[in-house]
Image (tube, rainbow, N blue to C red):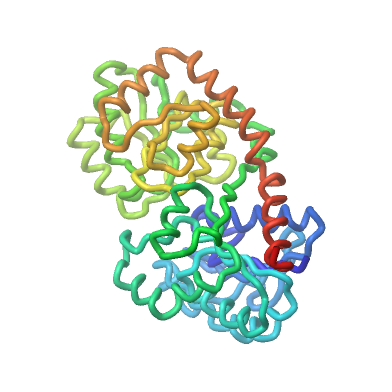
Amino acid sequence: MKILQVTNFFKPSWEAGGIARVAYEISKNLVQQGHEVTVFTTDGFKSRLKTIKNKPVNVDGINTYYFRNLSNYLTKRNIVIPYYLPFIARIKIQDFDVIHIHEHRTLLAVIVHYYSKKYNIPYVLQAHGTLPNTIGKQNLKKIFDVLWGNKILKDASKLISVSNTEVDQYLQMNVPIEKMVIIPNGIDVDSLSSLPEKGSFRARYHINQKHAILYLGRLHKIKGVDFLLRSFVELVKDIDDSVLILAGPDDGYKDKAKEQIREFGLEKKVIFTGYMGPMDKISAYLDADILVYPSSFEIFGLVPFEAIMSGTPVIVTDDCGCSEFIKRASCGYLVKYGDVTDFKCKMRLMLENPEIGNKFVENGQKYITNNLTWPLICKKMETLYENCIYKV
């Protein structure tokens, strides 16, 4: 098949978030399965990529168009304007068998949707948790949906959901359930097979405490950092020899988190690392006793599964999409968002009884290997694309 992937950001713009990583993994694995894959994306997130613009570049066998954004200032605020895209889309889109659009509230989606309908090319849409218009820029989202977004959802051949949580979000957008298919995100097991030396992360950040609790993700209000800090301050009353690592880029909440840390007197017990590259993340997983995922809203979440594959047990909130998989595999503790006592008790129980975490990890690694590797996930994508092409 000739497949087009459409995403605001792509390799190597990992700092843009998980969507870029998912689009890359899907594209890479489809190429390995013998398909011809093209990507329409833009030339970077926080800074422009030093690559050829508006022409195809070979990225691991993927024909990748990095369209120059009109304004890097706007791009940093997630307003992406790839002004040259229409000229290429007008010519190229008719050559594809199927299109996979990542996120629907983007100008890339608007342009590709227009030409896909013009040339009668089927497309699937994967929202990646961006559907709710009640979180950030509500008015802009509502206007966008009236102008384009609702039409993009309506015209999709299929809508990909990564969890039942996201299915509910599609239903709230008045999308018929027969259009939906659940395909979870995959785990790059190969990248976790060659692990760095244990202890390197602790050495780099001079961590001497016996117990290390790791949070890895953006520092954003919805990520539950405040809930984590309120629970951690209770934990250290029982287990003083503990440290909390907040690993990830600031997304508007770091100053508030620092304010909380000062209020709780945790200045010597919390470490900020900033953005973590792929190998740095693995080092952090290896040296942590627990990975915590306290988000108030998440349609999936790869981090807990990466931690499990690195041998680190996890605690996640039951509102996260990944919680349904954690529960199914019996590979971690679930806590209700906002329940400080339960969160504290689960952390303490896992720290004081490492055999519990070891069993969770064993269960999780088996489940991930049998169900969530990228080759397995992309086989499902392949079948979905074929069904759209042949209208099965």
Residue 69 rendering spot, x and y as whole percentages: 52, 76
Name the side, left or right, on which 249 lies relative to 261. right
In this orientation, does residue 76 appear? yes
Displayed quadrant of residue 267: top left
**Residue 287 visible in the snapshot:** no
Q: Nearer the viewer, residue 200 or 222?
A: 222
Where, quadrant-wise, is the C terminus in this rendering? bottom right
Q: Position of residue 197 (x, y in %)?
A: 61, 27
- Residue occupying the point 45% across, 49% down: 299
How many labels were placed on the picture? 0
The residue shown at (47%, 53%) is 167
Q: As displayed, is residue 204 above or below residue 62?
A: above
Q: Residue at x 37, y 38 (%)?
A: 294
Q: Nearer the viewer, residue 23 or 182?
A: 182
In the image, farthest residue toward the right: 34
Where is the N terminus found, in terms of image quarters?
A: bottom right
- Residue 239 in picture, x, y percent from top left: 31, 17
Say whether residue 117 is left or right of residue 134.
Answer: right
Residue 318, by quadrant, is top left
Above or below, 360 against 307 in this view is above
Looking at the picture, tell me which residue is in the foreground, 352 or 138: 138
Q: Residue at x 54, y 46 (%)?
A: 277
Give how far across and how far down residue 124 sits, in percent.
60, 65
